[in-house]
Amino acid sequence: MLNIHDLEVGYGGSTVLRRVGLRVEPGQIVCLMGRNGVGKTTLLKSIMGLLRPGQGKLSFNEWDMTYATPDKRAKAGIGYVPQGREVFPQLSVEENLILGLEACPQRTDKLPDTIFDMFPMLGKMLHRKGGHLSGGQQQQLAIGRALAAQPKLLLLDEPMEGIQPSIVMEIEHAIESIKKKKEIAVLLVEQSLEFATRIADYYYIIDKGSVVAQGSADELSDEIVKKHLTV
Ligand SMILES: Nc1ncnc2c1ncn2[C@@H]1O[C@H](COP(=O)(O)OP(=O)(O)OP(=O)(O)O)[C@@H](O)[C@H]1O
Ligand SMILES: [Mg+2]
């Protein structure tokens, strides 16, 4: 469904991503790994259309979206939860979720029940301000908001980063339930080998802006991780 070919992206004069190729199939959970600063966030931003490629092609369900705006990509079914979440602190949980409906291709004002099944906390705190939630709760809210648009592909940038273990478990269960339903594919940045082997179907490792390893997640070994991920 997502097909990236020969992608080059940079900031100003400096190239960050070089000749990146990556695929995500419908319903697949793909884990994107790599040390700090190698270009993981740059790749997700490029998929969402927040950065323009210097070269290469991105397509989504056969649609060439290489130069499409983020808005068009969202409407086509790509959801994005940025690193560091970014919920609106002054808006309530409910208002934050409703903003997610804007990207929904079917015009609706009803929030999908699946959000509250996955994260019951959100249902209980509908009127609390986003800024008054804990970091982990804000992450759940950010994921819930992306799910409100009923995406076909969800991009998650380090959803477990800096979050207390109990909420890490809840987010992991949410990703597991997404996987079971097979309706949404997930491309997520996550460094943990345990997580990748437990949940992901496929992995990519990036180093210095290029894909240096990829494969089925059950073939991901300590050796590969040591070679490409430890500092
Ligand atoms: N807005 C920007 N302007 C210029 N350079 C940037 C910008 N954002 C990122 N970079 C540079 O691009 C490179 C890749 O950054 P990126 O954020 O994609 O890495 P990352 O793999 O997501 O890192 P982390 O694990 O720390 O989140 C880094 O060298 C970074 O300094
Ligand atoms: Mg990053």
Image (cartoon, grey):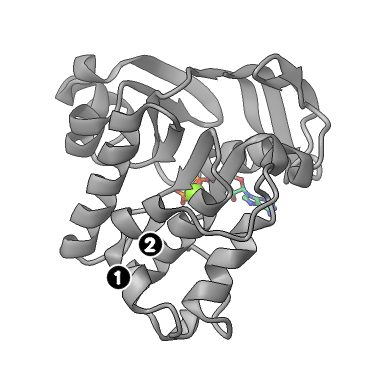
Q: Residues within 10 Å of mark 1 (few under 14, many from 20)?
A: some
Figure check: 108 above or below 190: below
Query: What element does badge 1 sit on?
Result: helix
Q: Is residue 199 left or right of residue 181?
A: left
Query: What element does badge 2 sit on?
Result: helix
Q: Are marks 1 and 2 in contact (CB under 8 Å)?
A: yes
Q: Is residue 38 visible?
A: no
Where is residue 12 drawn, in percent x and y? 80, 45
The residue depicted at 61 percent of the width and 38 percent of the height is 78
Where is residue 203 drawn, in percent x and y? 36, 23
Where is residue 110 drawn, in percent x and y? 56, 59
Q: CA distance from mark 1 to mark 2?
A: 9 Å
User: For this rendering, which residue is in front, 214 or 115?
Assistant: 115
Residue 177, by quadrant, is top left
> Residue 121 shows which numbered tag?
1
Figure check: 103 above or below 22: below
The residue depicted at 73 percent of the width and 46 percent of the height is 50
Question: What amino acid is at disc 1?
Answer: Met
